[in-house]
Image (cartoon, rainbow, N blue to C red):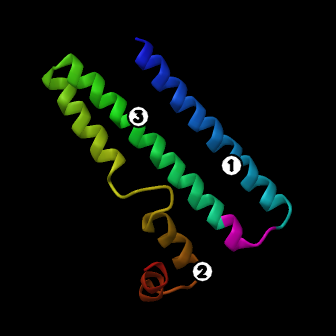
């Protein structure tokens, strides 16, 4: 029980840090900072969110393995698939409509993302 409480506190601490990062990005936009700096900070936020997701998955895995039920194992597989599906904060799926509405070709779009 104490380990679970410590783990929850770690998750909450990380989420508070992410919240601060997001507020920082808001201020950067309000202050007219350059796009490159803003995108760099957004990438850091995404990475931090993915880290929290991985930690949460780890906690769920421990809980499901401790319970030892087949349903728990299936649940872990489903959660892991969702987390590791390659659809992070900003995936190609999110960028494609933006590029297409601004007249970028599919070929140009792929070259710019790689």
Mark 2 in CB contact with mark 1 (< 8 angstroms): no
Q: Which mark is residue 40?
A: none
The residue to which callout 2 is attached is: 102
Location of residue 9 (image quadrant): top right
Identify the mark nearer the N-term, 3 or 1: 1
Quadrant that contains the C terminus: bottom left
Horizontal relation, residue 62 to residue 70: left or right: right
Q: Is residue 35 magenta?
A: yes
Q: Secondary structure at mark 2?
A: loop
Q: What residue lies at 32% left-to-right and 54% top-to-bottom?
A: 85
Residue occupying the far top of the picture: 1
**Sequence-first tag of 2 and 3:** 3
Residue tagged by mark 3?
56
Instruction: Locate residue 82 relative to residue 9 in the image: left or right.
Output: left
| Residue 1 position (above or below residue 27) | above
Question: Tag 1, which secondary structure?
Answer: helix
| Labels 2 and 3 touching (C-beta < 8 A) | no
Mark 2 Cα within 10 Å, few/some/many (few <14, many 20+)? few
The x, y position of residue 53, in whole percent, is 43, 41
Q: Residue furthest right?
A: 31
Q: How far separated are the C-alphas under marks 2 and 1?
A: 27 Å
Distance of mark 3 from mark 1, alpha carbons?
20 Å
Q: Is residue 78 magenta?
A: no
Which quarter of the figure is the N terminus placed in?
top left
Residue 2 vs residue 95, the one in the foreground: 2
Which region is colored magenta?
33-38
Residue 22, label in figure: 1
């Amino acid at each position: 029980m104490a380990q679970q409480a410590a783990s929850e506190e770690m998750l909450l601490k990380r989420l508070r840090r992410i919240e601060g990062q997001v507020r920082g990005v808001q201020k950067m936009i309000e202050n007219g900072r350059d796009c490159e700096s803003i995108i760099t900070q957004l990438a850091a936020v995404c990475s931090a969110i993915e880290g929290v997701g991985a930690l949460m998955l780890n906690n769920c895995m421990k809980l499901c393995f401790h319970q030892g039920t087949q349903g728990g194992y299936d649940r872990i597989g489903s959660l892991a698939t969702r987390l590791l599906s390659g659809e992070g904060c900003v995936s190609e799926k999110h960028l494609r409509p933006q590029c297409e509405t601004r007249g970028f070709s599919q070929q140009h779009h792929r070259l710019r993302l790689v």
